[in-house]
Image: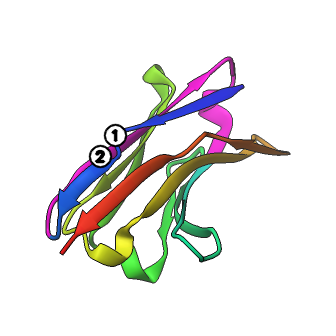
């Protein structure tokens, strides 16, 4: 299973970006519980948003009402819509799969850089 992120870049404060994560090689995308993590320089990786196979979503407090996680099962793709970006959102963003139906897994993408300038 290969996860490929895209959509990162440089944006001014208040701008928007949409990250995508395409899953290649997996045959059970509909059964995946998926996450977006981020890691800023010198900081630990943190969970930003989660979506279950039933499309239940959760967000870390700092991104609530600004970020939206979603999925397109027909395209094997996970998304993160990021609005009203702030400099503190600057990080490498990673896509992760941690469950396939009832089985625990740990699949990661290579990451995509998001930089927000003030």
Q: Residue under circle 2?
A: 18
On the image, the x and y values in percent for residue 23 come to 58, 27
Q: Which of marks 1 and 2 is in front?
A: 1
Find the magenta span and give its range.
14-33
Q: Do the residues labelled 1 and 2 touch (CB within 8 Å)?
A: yes
Looking at the picture, does residue 50 appear above or below residue 78?
A: below
On the image, the x and y values in percent for residue 3 come to 60, 32
Looking at the picture, does residue 97 appear above or below residue 93?
A: above
Q: In which quarter of the image is the C terminus?
A: bottom left
Q: Which of the pair 27/15 is nearer the observer? A: 15
Query: Which residue lies at the image location 44% right of the left edge and 82% below the top edge?
Result: 61
Q: Residue under circle 1?
A: 7
Q: Can residue 64 be seen in this view?
A: no
Q: Which of the pair 40/57 is nearer the observer? A: 40
Q: Is mark 2 on a helix, strand or loop?
A: strand
| N-term-proximal mark, 1 vs 2 | 1
Q: Is mark 1 on a helix, strand or loop?
A: loop
Query: Which residue lies at the image location 29% right of the left edge and 75% below the top edge?
Result: 87
């Amino acid at each position: 299973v290969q996860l490929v992120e895209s959509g990162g870049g440089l944006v001014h404060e208040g701008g928007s970006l949409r990250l995508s994560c395409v899953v290649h090689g997996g045959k059970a995308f509909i059964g995946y519980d998926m996450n977006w993590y981020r890691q800023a320089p010198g900081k630990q990786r943190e969970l930003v948003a989660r979506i279950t196979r039933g499309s239940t979503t959760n967000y870390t407090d700092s991104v609530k009402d600004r970020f939206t996680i979603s999925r397109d099962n027909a395209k094997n793709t996970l998304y993160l819509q990021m609005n009203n970006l702030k400099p503190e959102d600057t990080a490498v963003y990673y896509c992760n799969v941690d469950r396939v139906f009832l089985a625990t897994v740990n699949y990661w993408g290579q990451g995509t850089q998001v930089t927000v300038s003030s």
